[in-house]
Image (spheres, rainbow, N blue to C red):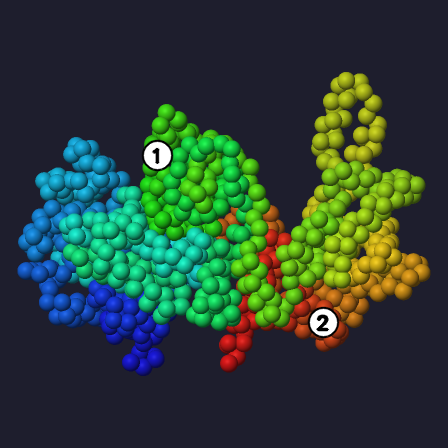
Amino acid sequence: MSESAVTTAMLVDFDKADPTDRSLLGGKGAGLAHMISMGLDVPPGFTVTTHACREFMRTGEIPEGLWNDVDDAVTRLEGKLGRAFGGGPAPLLVSVRSGAVHSMPGMMDTVLNLGLNSTLVKVVADWAGDERFAYSAYRRFIQMYSNVVLGLEMAPFERALARAKSDAGAGDDTELSTSDLRRLVAEYEGIVRGQGAKLPEDPTEQLRAAITAVFRSWENDRAVVYRRRHGIPDDLGTAANVQMMVFGDLGPTSGTGVCFTRDPSTGERTPYGDYLPQAQGEDVVAGIRDTLTLDDLSSRHPDLHTELLETMTRLEQSTRDMADIEFTIERNKLWILQTRAGKRTAAAAVRIAIDMVDEGLISTEDAVLRVDPAQLEQLERPRLQSRVDVDPVTTGIGASPGAAQGRVTFDPGRAVTMAADGTDVILVSPETTPDDIHGMYAARGILTSRGGKTSHAAVVARGEGKPAVTGASGLLVDEEAATGHIGDLTIHEGDEITIDGTTGSVYLGLLPLIEPRPTPELERLLNWADEIRQIGVRANADTGADAAKARAAGAEGIGLARTEHMFMGERLGIVQRLILADSDRDRSAALRELSTQQIGDFEGLLEAMDGLPVVVRLLDPPLHEFLPDRFELEAEIQQKVLKNKPVADLQHMASRVKEYEEDNPMLGLRGVRLGLVVSELYEMQTKAAVTAVIRRLDAGGDPHLELMIPLVSTVEELRRMRDMIRRVIADSGRDLHIPVGTMIELPRAALTAGEIAGVAEFFSFGTNDLTQMTYGLSRDDAGRFLGMYLKEGILTSDPFETIDVAGVGRLIQLAAKEGREANPALQLGVCGEHGGDPATIAFCRDVGLDYVSCSTPRIHVARLAAAQAEIRRIRQSE
């Protein structure tokens, strides 16, 4: 098949597909094709491709000819198997599963047991020799099809199932008898009719509707939320995989499970997974039954356990990655249903990458690419002490490591609301479903009473780096009453708990947590990254202590020290006296106080970063942040007037504050403008910085101070500041070189960068303000509508998280180009929080910037992302 034919194919049989064409087949389809090429026992089927889905999304109609292709594929499948779709004596039932290019576990829809109807259920019973199995499969089909395809609510079906189990005294649905299931099927059919819907009897109609529903599920709310969270483009679409059903619930010699070739929590090279006898795969991932271990599988089916382990090894060797595998045992035969690269915690990702290099499976470059940089922030999260003085109230499975504490909620929507109010939340549930994804993202940690190591809650939590405890069977959750019961103990919404996702322990109250420590594996990975990357990584830090932490994390200097942060707290009153002073004497007194403290600030930074550059930005606050609130002053005046107390001083202060009030403080007297209007302020800061440099030199240090002037819009502003700084240096009597540069954060500065570069020795792009100024919106206020913009596709990403390449990025590219043309020695960096975003780092490397600067917790992220950008640049050029 030609390349053009492959990329536009609507349907491909598993055994005819190219496993490398992931963009067409989706991850699941590519995995199935790969396993068949290896000769594994995979239930046959075909993939309706992402191209078909994209055409459906574009036109709103199923592409012309697709249903004929599907019919032909079903005929081919019948011929291979000697079975009949919609007939007998050997009936063919199929599953219809989504399969996007990027793994999105549980976010889109699946239909199992498709092909059943009220007549064929008897044929299936005869074929299987098990009437109970046939009605169980039909019950499952009705419930899943009604929800996924017909759009009916699950709750009535769940209530009917719960009543049936209660009436039969059954602990779970495996204990329901044939007659119980017949009655339940009849009740299900009544639920469908009662909601004005109809179950199609024609299997072909069922199949077409299920494929359409899978395509539509690409746009469901949970899938959209997941894509936003993980930066997956909206236009990729999903494939739909139609596969012969094999049955893990076909008697005592059948079962199903999910396994990983390594531990996805720790990365340890040991098989990891769950097994359920007499179950279908959805029972495992949904967490509705407590699972067994792979060791239990070994005791029940020793030969099949050995075969599974051999398959796991083969898959890992062939894919050179940790594999996530779904398997089914049907009457003592092992089938492999799907495989994909397994979701893993950050710690596991690092360890697996390192171990696979040591095992000769991958190169160091591949190891660097194998770890998601954004995951590394997880390693900065706290954990419980190894010994805790209180006993847990219950224990489950440690499904995702780390510790989390917060207030309990039993409702995902409440989790979002509480988190938005600044509350740390632990989401507690019997089990989670994909519809809970918004609450899971908002929560600090997740606790479920059911489910195993591979349940939905466990997989999502590991992917997000959130601590999770699953299968805490001692916990009974009453969602309607919003309570949890552990023996005689009742947990209410709002109660504080701590969970340990490493041990599976759950504690009442907030236990003390300890900070994590870097692992040797992480150090090795980052050292490899440092050898590869070509762009520097600096830190945003405002104190000596912060600078020391940043250096320990691998920062190569400070790209931004914000002096306004040094003036808050106890010093705020001094700054207010300085700004509001009525006389030179009062102003000078305030300046002397601030100068002494600033010298100490700068000394601390220079000492912590001895031998490395330290860029200090002179004062840049919106002025209102330093002034008292006039309305509060006036309220205080009124209270004193009522009590006949003197108010003259307060009235004078209120009057002076009013003089400085601005309609738009973000565009007012701040940055260089403040330095020019209140010139003593910047001069004081410069003298303090020069004094700090001299003291460090006299102490035998190696200080590398650079002074940055903020909010420059004209070259003349910067020239005057540079001349002032040079005068201060000259007056010191020491031969010092302190580079002077500016923050490019205004569009005019970017557009006139060639002029400004004639005066500046470095540019640092302040991407936070540059984004605000370019878009004409406030970062603080954008939250009111930005979510809607992203949901509606008006914006494809948050411009305050990832650089807007087309707008803000173009300004940066222009300023970098024209700045370097005017001054070839010009140093270029980024110091906004964009400096820790992997996509932005790749952009910065592409446009020739020298360094990025970010907060300390993101330094590891930036080091790794910079190396990945370099590897991709090199490989794309080869």
Disc 1 residue type (three-letter): Gly
Closer-to-camera residue (408/786): 408
Closer-to-camera residue (389/36): 389
Residue 20 horizontal/vertical position (percent): 35, 73
Secondary structure category for the residue under label 1 = loop
Looking at the rendered image, the disc whose residue lies closer to the viewer, 1 or 2, is 1
Residue topped by disc 2: 819
Name the image quarter holding the N terminus.
bottom left
Q: Residue at x 80, y 52 (%)?
A: 603
Disc 2 residue type (three-letter): Gly
Mark 2: few/some/many CA within 10 Å (<14, 14-19, 20+): many
The mark found on residue 866 in the picture is: none
Residue 661 horizontal/vertical position (percent): 75, 42
Residue topped by disc 1: 474
Using the rendered view, name the quadrant where residue 538 is placed.
bottom right
Closer-to-camera residue (564/69): 564
